[in-house]
Amino acid sequence: MKVLVPVKRVLDYNVKPRVKADGTGVDLANVKMSMNPFDEIAVEEAIRLKDKGVTEIVAVSIGEAKSQETLRTALAMGADRAILVVSDDKVEPLGVAKLLKAIVEAEKPDLVILGKQAIDDDNNQTGQMLAGLLGVGQATFASKVELASDSVTVTREVDGGSETEKLTLPAIITTDLRLNEPRYASLPNIMKAKSKPLDQKTPADYGVDVTPRLTTLKVVEPPKRTAGVKVADVDELVAKLKAMGVAK
């Protein structure tokens, strides 16, 4: 059984983003980059499923050549091989989904596990688009995954609590924070990862057009939070809430 795990290189979650002076985007020069946290959870879950019948884990990344570092991290965690689709231009979620569809058709995995969203753009679109393009079942926001020979049972988080779905393989899963705790790659595994296969492709190799369909007009930092106001008693609090239109 084969599992495909897409991973993305993003600004490290411990780094405070800085907007470029011209407002065209986030400044990524000389800042720490790492694997998207939700994708780390996806890699970890794929590794844990090796005890349930998974024989091969293929990590995939789409982006600039430096994304090799992210794939090497996935390989050090336990993935068996990796594919990097090199693109110097930013690829939008639809383009990523189309590329992943082509890779899935070539690799024929039984299961694709993705992070539910990337922390750089928070689109939460790729997994759903991929399932739609492939015409297979999907379970998003997974908090528990149980794999069988021809199906997968997923507990997913919803507004009212949780629900459990059973999908026939092949299927698409997107991971939520409570699914697992990703492992740290050990030094021996980091060294072994350097010799694991990592193929480089381009969007043209898969016949996919990744021309952007969206234009970013402006990027600005969120407004600074204003200072709070102390009130003397409940009556004053209610009066202020009424003035703001919060209370009636």
Image: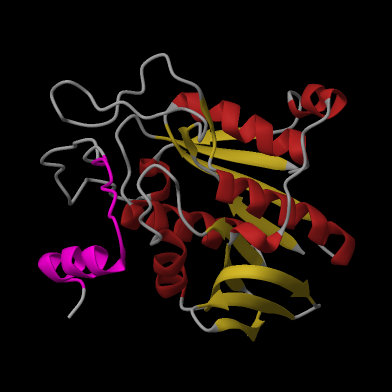
Task: Identify which residue, 230 or 15, lies in the foreground.
Answer: 230
Q: Is residue 221 left or right of residue 147?
A: left
Q: Tell me what residue is drawn at x 66 percent, y 30 percent.
A: 72
The residue positioned 22% from the left and 63% from the top of the image is 236
Q: Is residue 124 above or below residue 194?
A: below
247 sits left or right of 89 in the view:
left
- Which residue is at 29% across, 33% downward? 89
Say if the magenta span includes residue 44.
no
Q: How is the image coloured?
A: secondary structure
Residue 145 percent across, percent down from the top left: 72, 71
Q: Is residue 55 above or below residue 147?
A: above
In the displayed orientation, state which residue is furthest to the top: 30
- Give how far across and how far down residue 159 sits, in percent: 48, 79
User: Left of 149 or right of it: where is 91?
Assistant: left
Task: Place residue 240 in its image quadrant.
Answer: bottom left
Viewer-side residue, 167 vs 98: 167
Magenta stretch bounds: 225-246
Can I make out residue 178 in this image?
Answer: yes
Residue 120: x percent and y percent? Answer: 39, 42
**Coordinates of residue 15 in the picture (x, y in percent):** 47, 27
Q: In the rendered view of the protein, which quadrant contains the N terminus?
A: bottom right
- Residue 238 belongs to magenta span: yes
User: What residue do we see at 75% from left, 81% from top?
Assistant: 150
- Is residue 169 in sight in this rendering? no
Q: Picture quarter containing residue 78?
A: top right
